[in-house]
Amino acid sequence: MMPGVEIEPRRFCSGNQSWETRSDVSAFPRLAPEFTQGELFCRVMGETDAHGGLSLRITIAGGLTLTCQRCLGALQHDVQIAYRLLLARSASELERLDADPDCDAILIEAALDLVALVEDEVLLSLPLAAMHAEGECPSGDVQIFKE
Ligand SMILES: [Zn+2]
């Protein structure tokens, strides 16, 4: 299992630091139970804009496999996440950033775990019901019991 990667967001952004990993999905503590196989590439880059605004540029990509809840067969789930997360330095800045529908903002904290951040994003990308589209389960050993 991958240990957490804790950063200090202010220092991470002001120093233009970055973190990246290419890991098997089984290495992520909260993703391992959800997926049967797959690999994820993750990159988080700290940025500071001309006005001192802090943000994280987040890229997550990979092909994962989970279990179809209809046929219990393998279901491919591709992850392509790329966005900028703004880190508000005060409640009033958060309010201002939140007013822009194109922005994703959270209040900055003293510490942030990048592995947990990546896990949250991947879990949010999952469909509510993990299954092939109606009638698209691979045929053959599929058995559907109806009353
Ligand atoms: Zn299926």
Image (tube, helix red, strand yellow):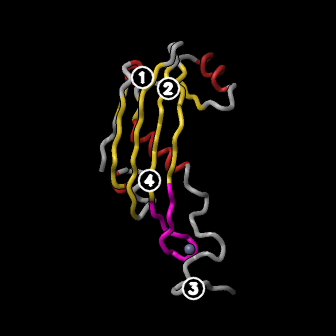
Q: Which label was assigned to residue 62?
A: 4
Q: Secondary structure at mark 1?
A: helix
Q: Secondary structure at mark 4?
A: strand
Q: Is residue 65 magenta?
A: yes
Q: What's under tag 2, amino acid-wise? A: Ser
Q: What's under tag 3, amino acid-wise? A: Gln
Q: Secondary structure at mark 2?
A: strand
Q: Looking at the image, which residue sits at the far front?
A: 50
Q: What's under tag 4, amino acid-wise? A: Gly
Answer yes or no: do the residues labelled 2 and 3 have beta carbons within 8 Å? no
Start and end of the magenta stretch? 64-78
Q: Secondary structure at mark 3?
A: loop
Quadrant in which residue 102 is drawn: top right
Q: Earlier in the sequence, mark 3 or mark 4?
A: 4
Q: Which residue is mark 1?
A: 13
The residue depicted at 44 percent of the width and 53 percent of the height is: 62
Q: Which residue is mark 2?
A: 55
Label 3 packing within 10 angstroms: few (<14), some (14-19), many (20+): few
Q: Earlier in the sequence, mark 4 or mark 2?
A: 2
At which x and y percent is residue 86? Answer: 54, 27
In the rendered image of this protein, does residue 143 appear above or below residue 42?
below
Q: Which residue is mark 3?
A: 143
Numbered disc in front, either 3 or 4:
4
Quarter of the picture for ligand 1?
bottom right
Numbered disc in front, either 2 or 3:
2
